[in-house]
């Protein structure tokens, strides 16, 4: 969720983790990796630490509490280490997989505990986005726990992997992303949506029930998974309904807005696609290419300049840097979507096309960083 004053930043590892995420997504697209390694490089090394650090960054504003400091900033680093070990376990060292799971569970519980403390220290009522963060982390913990059971008891590994997959993608990642889009899109449109708080309050039961029902239904009774797929549409459709009121601003918005809108459209396409695709690998590829890549690059285009130089005296530079990063954002999103559609047809050029689009964004990020009006990056 976006703070009302981005300059009030927590001393969190925002910048290095964001760079790691972008680099991991580029490597995912270009390196000839096995499927499980590719997925964990994107999600465990790239997305999980980024979500952790974003939660640390934004939760003080959501609860009107002090920024994270000292050991409080450890969970993203633990998550990054866990993700690296998970990737290593699929490449060579299978024995470290349980270590990776335990580290990730410790990081998740640690961050959940911090959010619990902030909720009780909050002056007044916390922002509704805090609850979405807590639900997302709870889904992540359950998914990690399921995989731990699968590693300890190999007979249950296939079932545990399905639960792990759905709780992580449609629980942890999707709940965080949808909750953030509720606030990020109006912010990027330079407007206020008075229905946001109501939607966050009303839609969370559907956002939580969807991954739980799909996870259970995938291993037990398929009608539950179909019901979960319907529930998964509620929050994004409600968000789309709210954006329809802002359609003129959306139509006239910059490329970053269009990139996030395309990511939202891709998410809406996932439940029906899941019923048509022959195996989960195609759906995960579509999720990464059509949803995560435009979402992360579009959000980073808006947020990175705010995080690099938060001092008010650099306001004009931040606006200029955002304009540079928004350039070609719509074209990138289209390339991501074309890559995802090609991936559904198992085309060999799917991932290289997504890699080309991500590489172009990294070049733009490099140019913006090179032209910063100071000679060193801040320590976030």
Image (spheres, grey):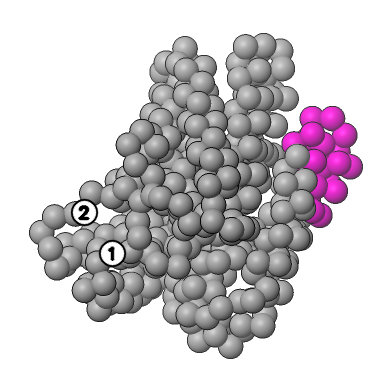
- Residue at 85%, 48% in the rendered image: 227
Label 2 vs 1, first from the N-terminus: 1
The residue that label 1 is drawn on is 310
Residue drawn at point x = 50 percent, y = 78 percent = 189
- Circle 2 sits in a helix, a strand or a loop, which is it? loop
Is residue 351 shown left or right of residue 211?
left
Instruction: State the residue in front, 380 or 15.
Output: 380
- The residue located at (60%, 16%) in the rendering is 151
In-image side of 229 versus 362 (left or right)? right
> Viewer-proximal residue, 223 or 247?
247
Number of labels in the image equals 2
The x and y percentages for residue 64 are 48, 57
- For label 2, the residue is 378
In magenta, the rendered stretch is 213-231
State whether residue 88 is above or below residue 307: above
- Evaluate whether residue 366 shows in this view: yes
Query: Mark 2 and 1 residues: CB-CB less than 8 Å, in contact?
Result: yes
């Amino acid at each position: 969720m976006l703070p009302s004053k981005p300059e009030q930043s927590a001393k969190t590892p925002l910048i290095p983790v964001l760079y790691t995420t972008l680099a991991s997504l580029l490597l995912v697209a270009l390196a000839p990796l096995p499927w499980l390694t590719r997925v964990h490089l994107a999600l465990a090394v790239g997305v999980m630490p980024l979500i952790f650090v974003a939660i640390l960054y934004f939760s003080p504003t959501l609860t009107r509490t002090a920024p994270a400091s000292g050991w409080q900033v450890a969970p993203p680093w633990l998550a990054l280490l866990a993700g690296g070990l998970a990737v290593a376990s699929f490449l060579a060292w299978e024995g470290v997989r349980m270590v990776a799971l335990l580290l990730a569970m410790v990081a998740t519980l640690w961050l959940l505990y911090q959010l619990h403390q902030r909720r009780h220290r909050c002056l007044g009522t916390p922002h509704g986005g805090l609850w979405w963060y807590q639900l997302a982390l709870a889904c992540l913990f359950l998914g990690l726990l399921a995989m731990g059971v699968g590693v300890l008891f190999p007979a249950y590994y296939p079932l545990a992997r399905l639960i792990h997959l759905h709780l992580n993608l449609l629980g942890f990642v999707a709940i965080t992303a949808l909750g953030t889009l509720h606030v990020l899109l109006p912010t990027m449109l330079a407007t206020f949506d008075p229905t946001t708080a109501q939607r966050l309050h009303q839609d969370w039961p559907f956002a939580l029930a969807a991954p739980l029902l799909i996870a259970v239904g995938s291993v037990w009774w398929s009608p539950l998974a179909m019901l979960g797929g319907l529930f998964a549409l509620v929050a994004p459709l409600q968000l789309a309904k709210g954006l329809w009121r802002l359609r003129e601003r959306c139509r006239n918005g910059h490329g970053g807005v269009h990139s996030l809108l395309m990511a939202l459209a891709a998410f809406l396409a996932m439940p029906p696609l899941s019923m048509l695709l022959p195996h989960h690998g195609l759906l995960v590829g579509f999720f990464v290419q059509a949803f995560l890549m435009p979402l992360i690059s579009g959000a980073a285009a808006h947020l990175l300049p705010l995080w690099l130089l938060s001092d008010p005296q650099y306001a004009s530079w931040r606006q200029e840097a955002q304009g540079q990063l928004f350039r070609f954002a719509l074209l990138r999103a289209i390339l991501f979507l074309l890559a995802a559609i090609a991936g559904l047809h198992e085309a060999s050029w799917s991932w290289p096309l997504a890699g080309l689009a991500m590489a172009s964004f990294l070049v733009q990020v490099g140019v913006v960083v090179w032209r910063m009006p100071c000679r060193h990056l801040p320590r976030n």
